[in-house]
Each structure stands twice: as C-alpha cells, then as structure tokens.
Image (cartoon, rainbow, N blue to C red):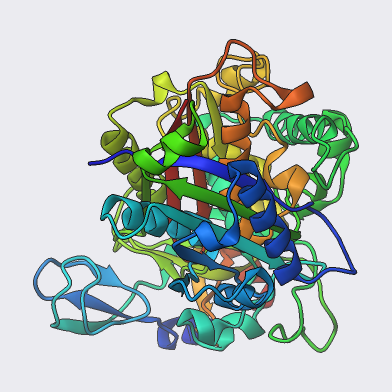
Amino acid sequence: MPNVAIVGVGLSRFGRQPDKSGRRLAVEAVQQALHDAGVAWPDVQIAFGGSDSSGLADTLVSDLGLTGIPFMNVKNGCATGGSALLSAMSAIRSGAADLALAVGFDKHPRGAFDPLPEEWGLPAGYGEAGLMVTTQFFGIKIARYTREHGITPTTLAKVAEKAYRNGSVNPNAWRRQPLSAEAIAAADMVNDPLTRYMFCSPGEGGAAVLLASPSAARQLDDAPVWLRAAATRTRRFGSFEVFSPAIQGTGTPSSVSSDAATAVFEAAGVAPCDIDVAQLQDTESGAEVMHLAECGFCEHGEQEKLIAEGETEIGGRLPVNTDGGCIANGEPIGASGLRQVHEVVTQLRGRAGDRQVSGRPRLGFTHVYGAPGISACTVLER
Amino acid sequence: MASTQQTVALAGSRCEGCGAVAFPPSERCMHCGVYGASRIRLSTQGRVWAYTIQRFPPKSPPYVPPPEGFRPFAVGYVELPEGIKVEAVLDCEEFTDLDAGSPVSLVATEPVPRFATVSHQGEAV
C-alpha cells in the first residue's frame, strides 16, 4: 500500500482556558498544523474530525474557510482522533486526496465524567446506584492486576511522578509542577488503589495532523515522518471494559488494546522491541502499567522492574509519555489521540526541547484506550 | 435473610449453540453471534474477582444517594460458578473482607446486582 506522510502537526494549549471554546482550540490546532506544513486551508482536500462533547468538527469550516471540501464528523470516544487519522490515511491511500486533515478537540467541565446509562445501552439503575463512574473501572482493573502480577503501590506512584516530571519540561502541558512519588501515594484515595494524583482529569485542548501522499509530501518536506500504520478495534467477547454489567466468558479477560496493537504492528511490519518512543493511554497510572504489557512492550509483571529501573523515563530504553501524557495534559477526549501523534512526531523530528529523547529515535508508537472498549494505535517512522 | 437468598436471583441467558452465559440476558449470543439463547437463573453464590471502593459521591443525576447520605461503598465483579463475572455493589463489614476471592451471596438484583459477604449477612440477620 502507498505510504502516507505526516507533513504538519498542530496543538492548542492544554488545560483550562475559560475564554476559549472547544471549537476555538480546534481552529488553533488546525492553523498550527497548516503553518507547520507550509500550506493554506484551501490546499486541504478532505477532512475528518470530532469531539466528544464540544460540537461538530465540520462546523470548523465557518472559521477556517468555506472551500467546499468533504468534512466527515467522527465520534468514537477516546478513539475519535485515531479514527479520524485512520480515515484520513485511507483517503490518501485510496487516491481520493493528496492532502487530508485529522482534527480532534474537547472542552470538559470540572470533575468526573457523568455519562447517562441509557446512552450506553444500560438500564437506568446503573446510574442511580452510582456505577456510571469511569474511574471505578480503572480501580477495579488495576486492583486485580496488582494482585495477580505483583505490581506495588510504589510503582503506581512512580508512573504518576514521571508524568508530572515530564509535564514540567513540556511548555504546553496543563500540570507543570513536579510531584514526588511519596506525595502522590499519600494523597486521598479516589478508587482504591488509585489516589487523586494518579488520575488524569477531564480537560481542554485541540490537536490536528495533516497527512499527504508521497508526491505531495515531497513538495513540502524533504524528510517527513511517515505514518507506517494505524489501527482501531472494538471489544471482543470476553473482554473487560468500562461500563460492563458483566465480563462474559471464562478465565482471563481479553484486551482490546492488545488486539489493536497486534494489528498495527502487523500492518507496520515491526515489533514492539523496535519502538524507540511510545505514547500509552494513561487515564491513570495503572493504565500505563497495564498497557505496557497489553501492547506487547513487556510481559505481565515485568513492569515492576522496568519502572524501578527507569526504563520508561525520557532517558530510559523505552521512553513512555514524554509530554506527560493524559496525567499532565488532561483528557480532552477528542484531542488526546492526536496529541499523542503530535508528541511522537515532535520527538522523531528531534524538536522536543528539554524533553527530547536522545539517540535520534526512528520509530514511534501511540495507543489510546476508552469506553466502551475501543482502542486506536499508530506506528510512526522518521 | 435465608428466604431472600432463595427467592432473589439474577436472570441470565445461555446460548443453545456454544453454551456461553450472558448477563444481562440476551437473545443473541455475544460469543457466536446467533439467535437462540435460553433464559437461566444465575448462581446466587460467587467469589469476589476484583473490587474498588467508590470514595467520592458520583455526580447526581444520575446518582441517587441513599436517604442517610453518601458513604463510600465497594463495587466490583463477582465470579460465578458459570464463569461469568457480574458487576455488583458489595456489602461487607470491612472493605478488606472482600480481599482474595472472598465468598459472597446475592442479596438484591435492583437497581443493580448486590452481593454481601457471609459475615455481613450474619450481622444483617
């Protein structure tokens, strides 16, 4: 299949911006991506994008310009950005366009998400009883995982400590104050064994990626980053997901993240051990721990040693969430997947400043996970 | 309490083809995708597969706190002999009573499944 190049990336500021709408953050991200690629909005031939709760992406044309291009709205939870990217990639590969945009954005109010059970195909009782709380799922999943695989509370605290430390050297991050593992571990429990500072918060931000065919890319960038592969998956029978009244089947649940990661590595023709820099969904610190193994970067239980030895730090063997991830940037649902791509592209270009991974990283990986059991992954190459 | 245990049961379904058990009951099997699942009563005894503690009051709506106000509660999955793990509110004396696969019994089905540890049921009686 023809290669697809990433010729432009853009990111709005992340974190609370009371004076700006979610759509405004999206427009800022798109303008940055256009500037980064050295193109203008009328050059874009097709667009895909979405937000979870901040409006329709196709309305952005009223700010960007009424050029008449096809613009498809994507609403796919945490995989919104990934699905938009996959669609843009497919448009380039099919020959439908030479320059395609993927954009994601959101602006969520303070506090936990408050989804309605009816919208998730569940009886109203789940809302009344207090079970429509996303953080519960992460608490339950990591509680089981720590017991089965010997992951300690110290490791959970160290993952969050890394997120805040990486955020402190990322000028665009929301949380820029380093926090010690001790302070993180001693904070109020939200959903045991996870404390307040181990969770990301619903937040605000926009992210945009411009994709190009090889011929269009040659005119714009003599050394683009290539989107080697992208894959999205929904849950299979027997998986354990947010808002599941039951885990069906018997034995150990399957993982949609494993399914998406396996698919993307197969499509890219590379293995997890080839990856130089990675972004893994860190809704909370336990998620990063579990996703390391689910995406194939280590065996279950090996994270304890890996993290103790600093392997996932910016200076480690596999730097993970170098921009501070969701924990330091917050979670604007529609934007996070493309924020991850933005960060890996920035690392592969060698322009990540104080948080730059050394040794000229060549291959990068991104992964999101979300309700009700979706995952989107990419492999990127310089 | 003993009579409650006998009458309260969760309705599930079992696929006539592959035998997969579902909760809530469904007409179409989520494993093999075909129609033809029959209704069954799920076991009322199981073991705690995993749990967490809901430490903060969920947003209202949709949450309806109890008349005496919100108190932290345990929520998790109970593994039944059928192999399926059912999400439930878990009643106990101490949260640590739920550790390491504690046996629990079904005590209510609405608004969501509710299981209790043996000691908690003893207290209740």
As drawn, A201 above or below A379 = below
Image quadrant containing the N terminus of chain B? bottom right
Looking at the image, which residue is at 73% across and 45% down?
A: A327
Q: Residue furthest top?
A: A359
Q: Quadrant of residue A111?
A: bottom right
Q: How many labels does the image show?
A: 0
Q: Quadrant of residue B21?
A: bottom left
Looking at the image, which residue is at 45% across and 85% down?
A: B8
Judging depth in this view, the residue of A78 and A38 nearest the camera is A38
Give the left or right position of residue B83, taking residue B55 as reference.
left
Give the left or right position of residue A70, taking residue A36 as reference.
left
Judging depth in this view, the residue of A366 and A34 nearest the camera is A34
Give the left or right position of residue A208, taking residue A213 as reference.
right
Q: In which quarter of the image is residue A100?
A: bottom left
Residue A252 appears in view: no
Judging depth in this view, the residue of B13 and A165 nearest the camera is A165
Residue A159 drawn at (x, y percent)? 70, 32
